[in-house]
Image (cartoon, coloured by chain):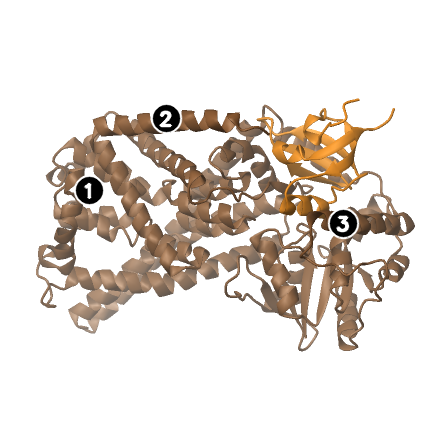
Amino acid sequence: MNKSKTIADMEIGSTAIIIEVSGEHSLKCRLSDMGLIPSTAVTLRKTAPMGDPLELHLRGYNLTLRREDARRITVKTEEL
Amino acid sequence: MTFAIAGNPNCGKTTLFNRLTGASRRTGNFPGVTVECKKGRIRHAPDCQAVDLPGIYSILPYSGEERVAYDYLNNNNPDGIINIVDAANIERNLYLTLQLIELNKPTVLALNMMDEVRVNGGFIDIDLLSQILGIPVIPISAAKNEGIDELVKAMTETAQKRILPKKSDFITESKTECTSEQYAVLAEIRYNFIEYICSKTVTKPRETREHKRSTVIDRLLTNKILALPIFFIIMATVFWLTFDVIGELLSDLLRMGMHTITETIDKTLTIHSINPILHSLIIDGVFKGIGSVLSFLPIIITLFFFLSMLEDSGYMARIAFIMDKPLRQIGLSGRSFVPMLIGFGCTVPAIMATRTLPSERDRVMTILLTPFMSCSAKIPIYAVFAAAFFDDNQALVMFLLYSIGILTGIILGAIFNKTHFRGNAVPFIMELPNYRLPSAKTTFLLMWDKARDFLARAFTIILVATIIIWFLRTLDIHFNIATTADESILAHIGRLIVPIFTPLGFTDWRAATALLTGFTAKEAVISTLAVLTGADLYEQAHALSAVFTDMKSVFTFLTFTLLYTPCIAAIAAIRRELRSVRMTVAVIFGQCAIAWIVAFLIGQPIILTIVIGLLCIWGVIDYFTKRKIPE
């Protein structure tokens, strides 16, 4: 399994668990506030018509995020 | 006593606020803030008022609008906090709750949309939740007006006895000044605690009906292929309804009403043989001036009605989602698209709509670019000129003009993005809320707000401006009554500024004067030209050829009209939103300068080609250098 997989690499419809959130200060704080913290399950629901931004589902709500910011969030796919 | 209503966006804050305050609300602007905090007296609770804060996800201010809420909670020291929580989305909502509890002020939790949870088979143990959090929890339904009295009672009691939250010892004293690592750890602690609370108190409903419905609607509205066509159809329908059907009808009615009032007063003044100068001031200055502006009121209200429907239903967030990628090319985010779109209708509501943008940088940039989207008041100008000079290609000319406006906006946006507004773009992190049927009460209160805003402006700044123009048109330089328009102060000013326009190819003072009066309203350009040429331009468009002798002057005049400073109402809106007179003056001069430059280039095809070539080369170089920068 690829170790450095991020939300941007996920397949549409798949679910993964967040390992780590990086990025500059305000981005990281914001992502933390929105509930994107380690061991949270995230589902990639779809992408916008031009492939960016992404639509995620986590903690019971939908969130949109740009691909470049999604690259800051590493995930692991759930064990089968 | 003052209670602040704090909560996440889209959890029913405004609905609760309207329930609490009813019709007795007063809207107050706090000076120096991005978005308004609304204040209102609470019904059935003497000496209590509620403050509606902008929706926030966290205490840490992130956007300008969130800073308003943050500053309010910290500086204004409300007697109590009503924390409204969407029960259907309790996990993320409780995050703010924990932070609010850390502020250590009397706090009551209003658990909204409990009905929705119950219907879907969910359950929340209110007593246990209250016990764990250490604050009173009141289940309410803001939309159905349930539990509001209990909420007010609990809040006043908590505030009167100054009952502070029974601080749970797990919560660390949080500071807003900490490293992102520490912050992330704090967030993790809070979310872990929330998971614990939820496991104890919440029986999760099966996937809610609302969420299921949203997923189905989204399958269509944000579909990879259909999203854009559907979006264009929806917007076209909104514009068509606003400008052609409803707004037009109401505008005509209002215009008829104004006309009747004007006539009546006109007659009364004549009967009582009032001094003709005063007579002219009242009728030509005040009534015609205000009347022409007031006739826009229905269009603006109708437009805002649709906009608030789009916003409250949740579609606006989807528009931002769809349009983010294309707009990022010029450094804007998807949210900026909406105001620009409204700009094609009317610049005034468009500028006002920028208030919804979370980032101050995007907001200012959008305010600067929106006026280049040609507004509907300019259509009569294009129409008259097209009829006079472009017999066979009228539609093509219109299309070209709109394109020039959009292109100028895009190029300027790209330049801003590389220069003054570089860098500090806020990441695009936005919730896509479930689709909801907008509440009629909220929508109508919003329309009433906008109408009042607009009326206040019409009777202050616009009134003064039209009176000044009337004086300039009526008096000659010796301050006697001018016998012909040729001798008025306005004509003299017109002649003074003619040299500015000589390089553009139009040397007639009447054209310059028309542009000058165009500052009050773009309709004035045509009406001034009509008065000064003495012809009804809708009927005898060819009369214009006396003023514009060659095609170059026609092109440059139209381009200048398209791009230069919008009407005084728009300037007032820009000043209000930028909150700076100096910046507004800079914007006015900037727009005139840009209009002049572009019009000049249009008149000089060779230089125009060179400039476009250079811009293309710059774009290509920029594109490739950007790609070389590693991740």
Q: Chain of mark 3?
A: B
- The answer to whether B252 is drawn above or below residue B277 in the figure is above
Q: Are marks 3 and 1 on the same chain?
A: yes
- Say what amino acid the circle numbered 2 marks: Cys
If the image is split into quadrants, where does the N terminus of chain B sit?
Answer: bottom right
Q: Residues within 10 Å of mark 2 (few under 14, many from 20)?
A: few
- Does B594 sit above or below residue B574? above
Q: Nearer the viewer, residue B544 or B165?
A: B165
Determine contact: label 3, label 1, CB under 8 Å: no
Circle 1: residue type:
Leu
Q: Colour of chain A?
A: orange
Q: Are marks 1 and 2 in contact (CB under 8 Å)?
A: no
- Of all chains, the one bearing label 2 is B
Q: Position of residue B450 (x, y in %)?
A: 49, 57
Q: Are marks 2 and 3 in contact (CB under 8 Å)?
A: no
Q: Position of residue B622 (x, y in %)?
A: 44, 29
- Residue at 49%, 48% (x, y): give it: B361
Mark 3 or 1: in front is 3
Estimate the spatial distance between the alpha carbons at disc 1 and disc 2, rounded to whole Å: 40 Å
Q: Identify the residue under disc 2.
A: B616
Q: Position of residue B191 (x, y in %)?
A: 80, 48
Q: Residue at x 13, y 33 (%)?
A: B550
Disc with the residue nearer the chain's start (1 vs 2): 1
Q: Position of residue B626 (x, y in %)?
A: 49, 29
> Chain B is shown in which shade?
brown
The residues tagged by marks 3 and 1 sit, at their Cα atoms, a distance apart of: 67 Å
Q: Can you tell which mark lies on residue B537?
A: 1
